[in-house]
Image: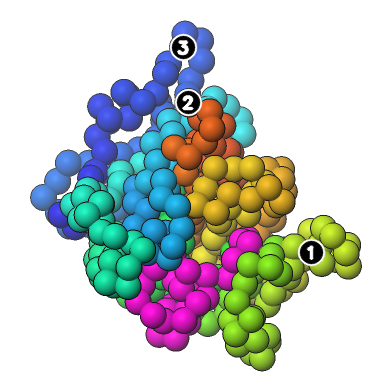
Amino acid sequence: MSHLVVYSQEDINQETRTRKNETKVGENVQVLKKSDATLLERLNQSDAEYVLLGLPEDIGIRANGGRGGAYSAWRPALFSLLNVQSNCFGDGSNILVLGHINFDDLMLAADGINFKTDKGLSKARELVEQIDERVFEVVKAIIQSGKEAIIVGGGHNNAYPNIKAAATGLQLSGVIKTENINCINCDAHSDFRVMEGRHSGNGFRYAYEQKFLSKYAIVGLHESYNAGNVLQFMMERPENFSLSFFEDIFIRENISFTQAVDKAIEHVKDNFCGIEIDMDTIQNIPSSAKTSSGISTIQARQYINRVASKLNACYLHIAEAAPVLSHIKTDNKTGKLIGYLIADYIKARNTFKSQKN
């Protein structure tokens, strides 16, 4: 856990803009108490239900031939969340802001790599394996403590350690017997490419082949941006994979967006489920693979609300946003959108739990 940067109350205070006669979420969130205990023991000392974790890296994306920049999503997202109003719709008291994982050494090593060569890509994919290890240990502790992880930033390479950590943490805590979970993803890409070394395009494939991922549902795949062999593999295994395509939903209108989401929910609802969203599925959001034809910000929020309110979720991962790539010098809207998605997730989860009880 040496790479985990744990935030103090002072860190939170520096990011929270207070005003007289108002209370911001940042004034109510929890932080870990200082202690020599293990991370798991310290997490167990908190009554928070949701643990916020940042992944400021983009090596997995670059190792997949994509544009970097996903390292820049975490801080503006955190700032946005801390500065929303505390009110009857949510006060932040059930959130623990854990901190972020430090990838500075790996990012520095990646800066010296020529990603256009096979040798360079091989080196980059070795760095991604080290990212896997760091993310796995932290997320596993969060899940094992009985809390839900809200993970912001980095490439979709992190889906693999997220899924592995969730499955392992749930098993270690005695919640499940078999070390696997399901996953639902709103994404233009399947990120299920071949196991050619770790990168952002094959996180779900590694999780599936290693049997940490049982069922996988994807909402909004783009027909033109998914390899034929990958689609064939998944289509031949309907018991494990559920796919809906952007063109079927929005171009041919064979199915509504809500119906597509509900189809995915039905496929994965029989087990604990990780919730993933790739920000490059949202139209004109700066990301590793920014699209001019995607879902709207409102539909992204609807997706989060619907799946989080109907599934037995164990984590949320908001991946691949890259505010630094915006044409606007100071891009505040991307962090604000992530803040909305986090708030939507927590409200929906609270609804799910109240209905369950």
Indicate which disc residue 330 carries.
2
Per the model, the C-alpha gap separating discs 2 and 3 is 23 Å
Q: Residue at x 64, y 42 (%)?
A: 284
- Relative depth, front residue between 207 and 250: 250
Residue 115: % across, % down: 33, 61
Q: Amino acid at mark 1?
A: Glu
Could you say where residue 145 lies in the image, as x and y percent from the top left? 34, 61
Q: Which residues are magenta?
A: 186-212
Per the image, the residue denoted by label 3 is 19
Q: Is residue 194 magenta?
A: yes
Front residue (pair 163, 36): 163
Q: Main secondary structure of the magenta part?
A: loop
Q: Is residue 54 above or below residue 328?
A: below
Q: Amino acid at mark 3?
A: Arg
User: In this image, 108 relative to 12: left or right?
Assistant: left
Q: Which residue is mark 1?
A: 247
Q: Residue drawn 46% across and 73% down?
A: 202
Label 3, secondary structure: give it: loop
Question: Which residue ends up furthest to the front in the rendered image?
Answer: 117
In the rendered image, residue 264 lying in the magenta stretch gets the answer: no
